[in-house]
Image: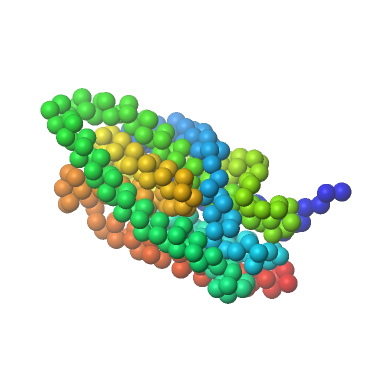
Amino acid sequence: MFEIPLLLVLIVLVALVFDFTNGAHDCANAIATVVSTKVVTPRLAVGCAAALNLIGALLGTEVAKTLGSGIVLPEVVEGSHVLVLAALVGAIGWNCITWYFGIPSSSSHALIGGLIGAAIAHSGLTGLNIGGIVNKVLLPLVISPLSGYAVGFVLMWIIYWLCARIQRSKVNRAFRKLQLLSAGFMATSHGLNDAQKTMGIITLALMIFGFADTTEHVPLWVKLSCAGAMACGTAIGGWKIVKTMGHRIFKLEPVHGFAAETSASLVIAGASMLGAPVSTTHTISACIFGVGSTKRLSAVRWTVAGQLVIAWVLTLPAASVIGCLSYLVLHLIWA
């Protein structure tokens, strides 16, 4: 009879719990601006975001491959059954802390940090793919928010230039409709990047337990379950982050929402094609700052930017510490 180890089942369940917390954190980014500008109702936005995240999750696996083998070396961690579980505990722990305070930190970097910390606890630095971490994590960590700010700023200026002679009320009416497209693009690109991260983790666990020969192929059931868990998280817990993204940074109008969502979608989709697991939180936040700066610098609440930067800097090391400690505890339990 085909038997599945209890620990593998637990890892998959915890991975889906992480995706749920990821949904509470990050899926809100895809709908925050369109809800805050009152283009659609929250319920409709959640439903559309869930469907488009599912579609996005099925469009590629490059980011999943990065999480499966680009952060830690599979041949080094193979056989360490608790490593993936410890990584997930580290990520969930940091997600819960930042969710409680309504800080839109990065679930992506929390997961990567947890994985790095658990790998170090297991085999030291030899278990890490240093080249992959630098090229696929650290560089995108810096480049993606800077790109988001720049693209948002430039796109908003282009819109101002094109619409300079048009009555403001007409502009906002037009962009209320266009924002539906930009929000859809944002949700799809979010699924293309974020939904793949847990897919890579589950696929790595399947390989460690001998149920997969490689992390290159992601089973369909893994794709569907990760996207579904993320959608549930959005519906239940995402509204604290929606409030921060949509109101506290900058008072958004439909034209601003369109510019921010389109800019973020372009950056995230580009990163996804390169296999870089970027932070949708940091990217859309930076885009909103960029869009708001075109009006005037004082229109943006830079104190919120300070909070985001603190979370941005702390997420990787904090999740790594929790992941490392979790590995040490779990290794004693399952030794």
Answer whether residue 296 is visible to the viewer in this image. Answer: yes
Front residue of 128/249: it is: 128
Q: Is residue 47 left or right of residue 183?
A: right
Position of residue 163 measured from the top left corner of the image (x, y, whole percent): 18, 30
Query: Which residue is drawn at the image coordinates 36% and 50% (left, top)?
Result: 283
**Residue farthest along the right direction in this orientation:** 1
Position of residue 313 measured from the top left corner of the image (x, y, whole percent): 38, 64
Query: Which residue is drawn at the image coordinates 33% and 42% (left, top)?
Result: 263
Position of residue 215 measured from the top left corner of the image (x, y, whole percent): 63, 53
Residue 178 position (above or below residue 206): above
Q: Looking at the rendering, which quadrant does residue 5 occupy?
A: bottom right
* Quadrant (top left, top right, bottom left, bottom right) of the C terminus: bottom right
Q: Looking at the rendering, which quadrant does residue 309 occupy?
A: bottom left
Query: Which residue is drawn at the image coordinates 73% and 52% (left, top)?
Result: 211
Q: Looking at the rendering, which quadrant does residue 30 occupy?
A: top left
Q: Is residue 75 left or right of residue 2?
A: left
Q: Is residue 81 left or right of residue 173?
A: right
Query: Which residue is drawn at the image coordinates 25% and 40% (left, top)?
Result: 155
Position of residue 46 measured from the top left corner of the image (x, y, whole percent): 46, 36
Answer whether residue 102 is visible to the viewer in this image. Answer: no
Residue 192 position (above or below residue 13): above
Front residue of 75/83: it is: 75
Count every numbered label the image shows and give the total: 0
Residue 323 position (above or below residue 92): below
